Amino acid sequence: MKLVSIVVPCYNEQEVLPMFYDEITKVTGEMAKTWPELEFEYLFINDGSKDNTLPILRSLADRDKRVRYISFSRNFGKESGMYAGLKNSRGDYIVVMDADLQHPPAFLPQMYGYVKDGEYDCATTRRVSRKGESKVRSWFARKFYKIMNKISQTEIVDGAQDFRFMTRQMVDAILDMSEYNRFSKGIFSWVGFSTRYIEYENVERPAGTSSWSFWGLFKYSLEGIMAFSTAPLAISSLLGIISCVIAFILMIVTVIKTLAFGEDVAGYPTTICVIFLLSGLQLFCTGILGQYLSKTYLETKHRPIYIAKETDELYRERKADKGQKAPSGEDKSA
């Protein structure tokens, strides 16, 4: 038998979780009929949700022994959720997908077909359209991929998603990269392994709202650039060289104009403009250095990537100790 672990990070997904569970169990049930050697487990990661996500996961765990969950002590972010899911998965194959159904479970049979024969180590989806997104957000997303692929040695395919069907070997390689500042899109590409991309049209959420704001995505893109490229450091050095060259040229021009033509040297306005220009360049370059230094500082602290407050095993043990079934609609966590 081959076990497939389906890892699902969740943050405030109470509206879509029941729909996702119904859809994923339907698809995996059909897969088990087609490939009798397959078994499944569903590992949900509750990333500090503030709604009823955790009670719903408890209810699902009561109904289905294949359902496992880990609930964080607070919101650590999707990257931590994916890492926790990969680290605690038990399967021979591991799937990472979102709970909002924008990663259609219907692709799982096709993805398994590519991976099971050993030709590919990973099957993933790639959006060929951004239907439902604003034009500004789509424009910035396309520019990010172009810039990232130009300044980084790690190629990230435009539109590639975190929805992946991977072998245990590939997941173990990803887990070996236990860095605190994680950018999974880059990590998936960096570890290598043969990957099959499946193109599809973007699917909108059936319910609820995305927790990703434009500002959040912008910061996430900066994380990716700093995690897989040192080009910004080179840019700061280049700006310093350019500033020195310009200053040297202006100095020569000023001397020639004064000695040869007797023109007065520009005074206060010119001085203020030069001061503001150079100060701005210095602060910009210092800011770039500070960002890289802050990432290094966080890595040296060796803080845990996530902290688990409750798991399905702990929940079942508490129920057994109490000798009664805990109500699934109430939050009984300590």
Image (tube, rainbow, N blue to C red):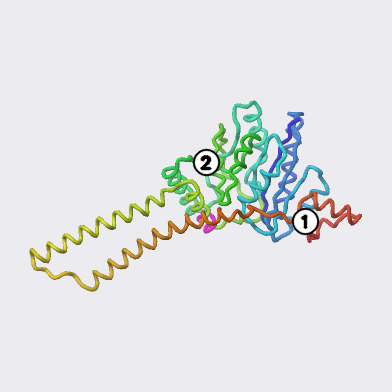
Q: Assess disc 1: are there few (<14), some (14-19) or many (≥20) residues with their C-alpha within 10 Å of its C-alpha.
A: some
**Secondary structure type for disc 2:** loop
Q: Quadrant of the C terminus?
A: bottom right
Left or right for 234, reference 317: left
Left or right for 253, reference 134: left
Percent x, y of residue 99? 67, 48
- Residue receiving disc 2: 128
State yes or no: residue 143 in magenta. Answer: no
Q: Assess disc 2: are there few (<14), some (14-19) or many (≥20) residues with their C-alpha within 10 Å of its C-alpha.
A: some
Q: What amino acid is found at the position of numbered circle 2 in the picture?
A: Val
| Magenta residues, start to end | 214-218
Q: In the rendered image, is residue 149 in sight?
A: yes
Left or right for 226, reference 43: left
Give the distance between the C-alpha atoms of the residues marked 1 and 2, in whole angstroms: 36 Å
Q: Quadrant of the N terminus?
A: top right
Image quadrant of residue 25? Answer: top right
Percent x, y of residue 266? 19, 70
Q: In the rendered image, is residue 13 in sight?
A: no
Task: Report the number of numbered marks.
Answer: 2
Looking at the picture, does residue 207 appear above or below residue 195? below
**What residue is rendered at 50% in x and 41% in y?**
156
**In front: 256, or 55?**
256
**In front: 285, or 143?**
285
Q: In the displayed orientation, state which residue is furthest to the bottom.
A: 268
Q: What amino acid is found at the position of numbered circle 1 in the picture?
A: Pro
Q: In the displayed orientation, state which residue is furthest to the right.
A: 323
State yes or no: residue 215 in magenta. Answer: yes
**What label sits on residue 55 in the rendered view?**
1
Image quadrant of residue 323? Answer: bottom right
Looking at the picture, does residue 111 appear above or below residue 22? above
**What residue is rendered at 11% in x and 68% in y?**
263
Q: Which of the two discs, 1 and 2, sits closer to the camera? A: 1
